[in-house]
Amino acid sequence: MMNYPYEIKETDKSCFPLYDQVSMNVDVRSEYRVSMIDGGLGGLQFEEVPVTPYVKDLSVYEEALKYEEMFDISTWRFFMAFDGEKPIGAMTIAGTTEGMNMLGGRKDACVLWDIRVADGYKHKGIGQRLLDQGIAAAREDGYKVMIIPKSTRKHTPQSPRSRTRYSLCGSWGCNKKRKKLKHRRTPIPAHG
């Protein structure tokens, strides 16, 4: 096993000020243009168009300090990565929560609510290690499915994000979803 110089640990809401220090910058090189087909009756068409590259800070949409204003976070778990005392990564797994439509009423599902790695620390396996620890915690809490959102737009109980489901039991809930997660570099091993 590779020796990592960074510490990954579970935290609680007392660490939210540190959590919010971790940047959520993404490099944008293209955007999607949306057009209606047959006046909207035929659906929507998405066309990827190149743009002048820029960096977008998504942390303006996601502040851990505000989680309790929106939800009961008593079933949520929080993880952080540190380089010494410096916060360099963070992740939230949202458990069963009243008013959260993303779970579709399921009691056996949780949501990967937020994951971020600071600039300068990306592509070093930190995000994967956070995710692995979150998946282990979700299994420990008895969840069978983790919903992995495809969007990072601001979420409210009224506007759930689009999502993909990943079975924590080692099998896929829907074979059609498999293609959507092929980009994952390291497959998540089956439980047991």
Image (spheres, grey):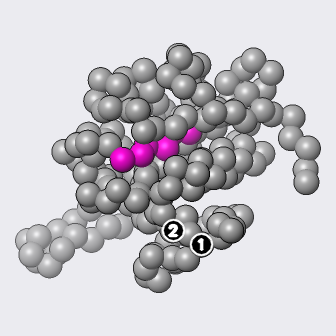
Q: Nearest the camera: 188 or 154?
A: 188
Q: Could you tell me how far apart the alpha carbons at marks 1 and 2 are, in whole angstroms?
A: 6 Å
User: Residue under circle 1?
Assistant: 170
**Measuring 35% from the left and 56% from the top, which residue is drawn there?**
107
Residue type at mark 2: give it.
Answer: Ser
- Give the prevailing secondary structure in the magenta stretch: strand
Image quarter hosting the N terminus: bottom right
Above or below, 33 relative to 99:
below
- Residue 109 in percent (x, y) is at 41, 57
User: Residue under circle 2?
Assistant: 167
Q: Is residue 22 left or right of residue 30?
A: right
Residue type at mark 1: give it.
Answer: Gly
Contact (CB < 8 A) between labels 1 and 2?
yes
* Residue 92 belongs to the span the image colors magenta: yes
Answer whether residue 31 is visible to the viewer in this image.
no
Q: Nearest the camera: 26 or 116?
A: 116
State the extent of the magenta-drawn residues as a range: 91-96
**Measuring 80% from the left and 21% from the top, which residue is drawn there?**
84
Quadrant of residue 71 within the rendered picture: top left
- Graded by Cα atoms within 10 Å as few (under 14), some (14 to 19) or many (20 or more), the crowding at tag 1 reads some
Residue farthest toward the bottom in the current orientation of the protein: 175
